[in-house]
Structures are given as structure tokens and as C-alpha cells.
Amino acid sequence: MYPTMFVAHGTPSLALENNAYTRFLRNVGILLPKPQAIVMISSHWEHSTVQISSAPQLETMYDFFGFPEPLYDITYPAKGNLPLSLDIQQLLGAEGIDCELNERRGLDHGAWSVLRFMYPEADVPVVALSFNPRLVPEEQYRFGRALMPLREKGILILCSGGTVHNLAKLQWETVGGEGWAMAFDRWLAEHIQVWDQEALFDYERRAPYVSDAVPTHEHLLPLFISMGAADVKRKARLLHQEYQYRTLSLAAWMFQ
């Protein structure tokens, strides 16, 4: 059964960088068997009803401004997979999760900025899904669990966001992580590794420095979707952890 992953996408400029994290993403794409397709859930596609991309060719979206011009020259010409889109619609519908096909949506930077390192040839079909950030962690987990049968078909369920994502406190010229950022990530790791759902689902009350680490929650919530899609063996592995600009966690988790 193919593993699921949660990866950080940092800032849009990550797509131009050559550093330890982007090299890690390249290595993951090389070391893992090539998936039959990718189901991509980015924290930057929010919708109250789950949207399922169904276009034959996914447009590269530039959903940011004020970044270096070379970013706007990047394209990631991923192809869609309509049969997979229809399979997802059926799986979610069977679980009572409202969803609909969306033939207009492309890939936002939270998706293509990591995919371009993992699969630079854009030779793996991609179906993007939206998520609802107003749902509680238990419901995000249930959403992921509904997708679990796809793993048996060699499909990678890839969620993109960030465990610590405080743009207001970035320190652009410094390296390493703030103490509170590392403390929050340590708390997450301790509970993820033993699959402590009770604590994780209640992270807003139990985790340290929540207001600093996740002033808004949309970048963290896809983590629970990725975990939900691995609800059988419940094995977690932290593959990479570092910090940019002191308050931006570049963490990557694999679940099996």
C-alpha cells in the first residue's frame, strides 16, 4: 500500500531554491516508487464543499504577488486523470462527504512548488482536492480516511501545508527556529509518533505556543487528512525538519 505524505511548502520562493529541503524533496521523488497518480491537497485551496479537479491539463496558478519575477515563469504542466477524479467522487459520496467535480481549477503554489522537485518531469497525473478549513481535526481525519482505498492502487495522497506557519513573525535574514516554534513541533511529533488522536485533535488547547505557531489553522489541518488516509497501520515517520526565517517550519511526514 502506497504511503501518504504531509510536506511543508514554505513561501512561494521555495520553488526557486536549492537547499537541504528542496534536495530532500527531490530525493523523495527518486527513492519512492513512482506512483500511478497523485491526489494533491494543498492548504491554499479552500472550499466548503470538496472540489475535485477534473481538467485533462492542470493550469499552473500564480496565487501570490510581490515575489521575484522568475517565479512567474515556472510552469508545471501536470495532466489530470478523470477516471481517478470520478473514483474520488464515489469514495467521498459513499462516506456522506459532499463533493463535486471542478474542471476549471489548476494547481496553486502550495501544490506545484513541491511537485516540481519531487516529480520534475510532470509525468505523474495529478488530481487536486480542496478542503474545508472550518472543519475540526476529527472531520479532516475522516476526509483522509475516505481516500484510503486509493493507496491500494499505488496512488500517493500528498498533503501540503506547514506545521508552524507564522508569516507575521518571519525574520528574513536569520536561520534556525524560534524556541516556541521548535517546542510546538516537538509536541506534535511526540503525539504523532504514538498516534495519539485524542491529544492531536485537541491541539488548540493542549499544544504549547499554539497562537504563535498556528495563528491561522489552514496550513496545519491537511496533516490530519494525511494521517486519516493511513488509518490502518498508523505508522508515522518524520523525514525532514528544519526552519526558515525562524518561524517557518519545513517539516515532512510519511504515514503508512
Image: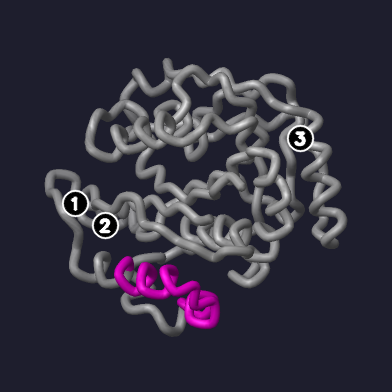
- Residue 72 location, quadrant: top left
Disc 1 residue type (three-letter):
Gln
Camera-side residue: 53 or 122?
A: 122
Camera-side residue: 54 or 13?
A: 54
Tag of residue 247: 2
Label 1 Cα neighbours within 10 Å, binned few <14 / some 14-19 / many ≥20: some
| Front label number (1 vs 2) | 2
Disc 2 residue type (three-letter):
Thr
Q: Look at mark 3 in the image and give the residue it sits on.
A: 84
Report the coloring of the rendering. one colour
For the magenta stretch, what is the residue range?
Answer: 185-203
Label 2 Cα neighbours within 10 Å, binned few <14 / some 14-19 / many ≥20: many
**Mark found first going from the N terminus, 1 or 2:** 1
- Residue 180 location, quadrant: bottom left
Disc 3 residue type (three-letter):
Leu
Q: Is residue 77 left or right of residue 246?
A: right
Mark 3 lies on a secondary structure that is helix
Residue 164 visible in the picture: yes
Mark 1 lies on a secondary structure that is loop
Q: Look at mark 1 in the image and give the residue it sits on.
A: 171
Give me the residue at 50% from left, 49% from top. Answer: 5
